[in-house]
Image (tube, rainbow, N blue to C red):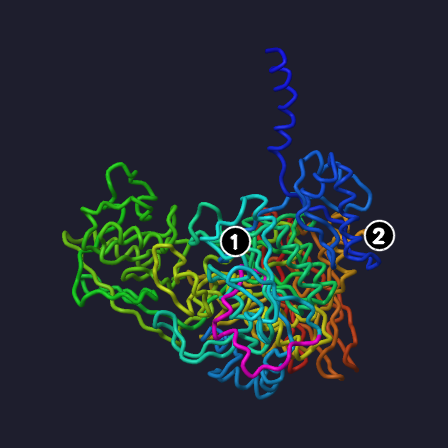
């Protein structure tokens, strides 16, 4: 007995150590370029061997050795082993892998941003001045866009290579084969594909191959949608279940695509719940993409909260990409409408919010009193031309369901078939069930159709979902009208009129309610997001291995689908980047970001300032610099350029140990808002501060720019000098921005976190180079 007790006591620490083991990323910075690939792996292995009991254990624990641009490895470690490695020379940082969940976050969107035919008067005027952007950019030909996502459906016509030229000589990647995916699935459009599973399987065990393909093939739809939004070919006569008919096209239809599949099904969850993406898998993908020769990376992935740059795999990978002059666009996230919710805030990343286009899928709801409410839906199912009994979900729940705020959410099993059969049911957004699942619950309980009602947080932001029964989505204001009607009569009745596609809807754009917002929680002196683009109800290609709802209960298969999220707006910006890079191949990634930001739009299609989904004025914490305008971005006049060294100095200034081991921080630091960024944020201003910015002339050789300022309320802003003279292209000029609180003592009565917004602009009579400001008091 004594031996057994002793043996258990001996085992307990070992068992605890095993239980604590998880994947850590050990980061060294940049490769010197002096080691061969096998020497790099041996070098990484030597570090593992120093904390492991045997060579076999060290080999077995290694998941990835990052060998191209990123210098580091991912391995299964105990916290004690990770701590020992973090203390070693040359190790920059050691951090646990974070699981990243997809931020779920087009025929019309490219017309709406002024890229395709169907332009408005102002857009046509601009195009006459600058020429056709698509033609100038040769439709993105020779530009390679890497998609870090969950794969691709290669048979889609959007990825046809018909009539395309040879693969760019700069391409060095591969077409990785796997289940239902072989080398023939790559072509001159889809030039490469890889998949990454080691991190996912280390945490979850072997992939369940009934839920996804062990290959670059997409069984979800998300990756196919984003890839075709960036660079899908023009495909005529497409629609999503009969809605949004027209020609589908990516923004850069002749750009080449490289697929990096890093996201996989969440174990034990339905595909409706999204995907999970592991940091070590994403870092491996970005490292390969850099070596493969991509020019742009589109990453529609994020977390519910950001991590410090030294512990953020996407930020680290993107910094290496930036050093190689690869432009990285990332989604801001779908955690709005609350403040400080955005992810991917690193200043070397283009962080993208989501807004609407001028297309609606109008599906009216008619009440028994004759009132018609304009909802939206893309469900193909229709009711008979008659009125049906109408009920509120909270009034028809099964016994035992608490009659609280969640009773109206139509969660699984909550509705009573005896009270629901043959009726229309009003369900509210929120709760456990997702939007599609609410309709499935109504159908299970025998309802003939349902109304998806917004909460006040959702405002007028109406998702056009392909429900499995007749349905429409209505605003929170209309929910109030419906509930008042139900209360006003003993026999409330209603019907849903079949939907139709309506173009030129007004006002547009408006900010989607779900789009994540600033201020930036990692560094409150960098204004994020950077820009907004179309992300609400976007039509693009879809995986035929999935259904339009991604529900296992949905038997339908579609080639194109309508989807929403900052995941959809991010590839719009990536496509614009591809076009600008094709026109200006020597511009830096920072110059391209600057061009997009300083030319972005601030007004909607009725000439008023962009609003949120409830009709209230939006601000730069929602849209950044404004709404994407690719045609103007091709000729910005001036750019705010930033080098890789500038980013390293910035990291020093915010107290982050250099992410490049070869770079030593200076002894004297500066304020982080002196980074040469195309926007300005000053957090907790005490009285007065002066910031420096530098612009580079990329317009006319001889030009004169005059400054103008719209000061944030409660502050004075002075720009010196107020006039900039240029006599050649590439010339740089610096200026100072002094921001001063008008009455600091009186202003201190306000909430310290309350920001005021303004703008400073340079204009030469042709170009309007505008930057947003956000300022708060200490």
Q: According to the image, label 1 marks what residue?
A: 264
| Dominant secondary structure of the residues highlighted in magenta in the image | loop
The secondary element bearing badge 1 is classed as strand
Q: What is the x, y in percent for residue 726?
A: 77, 79
Name which residue lies at 25% across and 50% down: 392
The secondary element bearing badge 2 is classed as loop
**Which portion, as a residue range, is magenta?**
147-169
* Residue 144 vertical position relative to residue 685 in the rendered view, above or below: below
Q: How crowded is mark 1: few (under 14 residues within 10 Å), some or many (20 or more)?
A: many
- Cα–Cα span, label 1 and label 2: 43 Å
Query: Left of 510 or right of it: where is 175?
Result: right
Q: Does the magenta stretch include residue 380?
A: no
Query: Left of 49 or right of it: where is 177?
Result: left
In the rendered structure, are the residues bearing label 1 and label 2 in contact, judged by CB atoms less than 8 Å apart?
A: no
Q: According to the image, label 2 marks what residue?
A: 666
Residue 750 shows up from this direction: no
């Amino acid at each position: 007995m004594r031996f057994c007790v002793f043996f258990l006591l001996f085992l307990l620490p070992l068992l605890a150590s095993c239980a604590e083991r998880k994947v850590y990323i050990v980061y060294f910075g940049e490769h010197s370029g002096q080691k061969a690939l096998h020497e790099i792996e041996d070098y990484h292995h030597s570090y593992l061997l120093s904390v492991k009991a045997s060579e076999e254990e060290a080999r077995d624990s290694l998941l990835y050795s990052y060998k191209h641009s990123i210098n580091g490895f991912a391995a299964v470690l105990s916290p004690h082993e990770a701590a020992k490695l973090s203390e070693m020379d040359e190790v920059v940082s050691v951090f646990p892998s974070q699981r990243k969940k997809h931020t779920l976050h087009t025929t019309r969107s490219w017309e709406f941003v002024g890229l395709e035919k169907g332009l408005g008067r102002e857009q046509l005027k601009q195009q006459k001045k600058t020429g056709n952007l698509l033609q100038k950019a040769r439709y993105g030909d020779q530009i390679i866009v890497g998609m870090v996502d969950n794969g691709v459906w290669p048979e889609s016509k959007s990825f046809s290579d018909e009539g395309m030229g040879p693969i760019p000589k700069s391409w060095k990647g591969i077409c990785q084969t796997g289940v239902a995916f072989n080398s023939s699935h790559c072509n001159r459009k889809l030039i490469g594909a890889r998949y990454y599973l080691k991190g996912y399987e280390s945490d979850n065990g072997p992939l369940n191959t009934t839920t996804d393909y062990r290959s670059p093939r997409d069984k979800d739809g998300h990756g196919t949608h984003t890839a075709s939004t960036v660079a899908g070919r023009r495909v005529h006569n497409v629609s999503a279940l009969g809605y949004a008919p027209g020609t589908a096209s990516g923004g850069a239809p002749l750009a080449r695509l490289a697929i990096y599949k890093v996201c996989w099904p969440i174990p034990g969850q339905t595909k409706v719940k999204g995907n999970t993406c592991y940091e070590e898998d994403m870092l491996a993908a970005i490292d390969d993409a850099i070596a493969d020769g991509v020019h742009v990376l589109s990453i529609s992935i994020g977390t519910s909260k950001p991590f410090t740059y030294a512990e953020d795999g996407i930020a680290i990978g993107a910094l290496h990409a930036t050093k190689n002059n690869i432009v990285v666009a990332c989604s801001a996230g779908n955690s709005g409408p609350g403040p400080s919710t955005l992810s991917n805030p690193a200043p070397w990343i283009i962080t993208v919010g989501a807004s609407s286009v001028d297309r609606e899928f109008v599906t009216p709801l008619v009440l028994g009193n004759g009132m018609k409410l304009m909802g939206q839906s893309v469900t193909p199912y229709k009711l008979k031309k008659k009125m049906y009994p109408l009920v509120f979900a909270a009034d028809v729940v099964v016994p035992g369901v608490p009659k609280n705020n969640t009773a109206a959410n139509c969660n699984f099993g909550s509705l009573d078939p005896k009270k629901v059969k043959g009726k229309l049911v009003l369900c509210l957004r929120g709760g456990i069930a997702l939007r599609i699942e609410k309709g499935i619950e109504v159908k299970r309980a025998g309802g003939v159709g349902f109304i998806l009602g917004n909460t006040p947080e959702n405002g007028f932001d109406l998702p056009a979902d392909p429900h499995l029964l007749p349905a429409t989505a209505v605003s929170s204001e209309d929910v109030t009208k419906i509930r008042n009607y139900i209360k006003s009569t003993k026999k409330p009745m209603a019907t849903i009129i079949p939907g139709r596609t309506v173009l030129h809807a007004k006002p547009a754009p408006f900010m989607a309610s779900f789009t994540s917002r600033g201020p930036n929680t990692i560094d409150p002196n960098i204004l994020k997001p950077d820009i907004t683009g179309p992300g609400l109800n976007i039509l693009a290609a879809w995986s035929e291995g999935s259904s339009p709802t991604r529900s296992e209960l949905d038997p339908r298969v579609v080639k194109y689908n309508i989807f929403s999220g900052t995941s959809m707006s991010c590839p719009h910006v990536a496509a614009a980047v591809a076009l600008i890079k094709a026109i200006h191949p020597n511009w830096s990634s920072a110059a391209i970001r600057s061009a997009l930001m300083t030319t972005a739009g601030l007004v909607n299609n009725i000439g008023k300032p962009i609003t949120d989904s409830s009709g209230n004025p939006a601000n730069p914490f929602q849209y950044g610099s404004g709404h994407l305008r690719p045609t103007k971005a091709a000729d910005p006049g001036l750019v705010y350029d930033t080098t890789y060294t500038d980013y390293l100095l910035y990291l020093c200034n915010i107290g982050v140990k250099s992410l490049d081991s070869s770079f030593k921080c200076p002894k004297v630091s500066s304020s982080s808002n002196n980074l040469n960024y195309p926007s300005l944020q000053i957090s907790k201003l005490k009285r007065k501060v002066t910031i420096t910015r530098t612009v580079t002339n990329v317009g006319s050789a001889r030009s004169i720019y005059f400054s103008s300022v719209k000061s944030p309320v409660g502050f004075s802003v002075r720009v010196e000098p107020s006039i900039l003279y240029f006599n050649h292209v590439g010339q740089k000029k610096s200026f100072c921005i002094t921001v001063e609180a008008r009455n600091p003592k009186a202003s201190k009565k306000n909430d310290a976190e309350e920001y005021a917004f303004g703008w400073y602009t340079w204009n030469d009579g042709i170009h309007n180079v505008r930057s947003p400001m956000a300022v708060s008091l200490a």
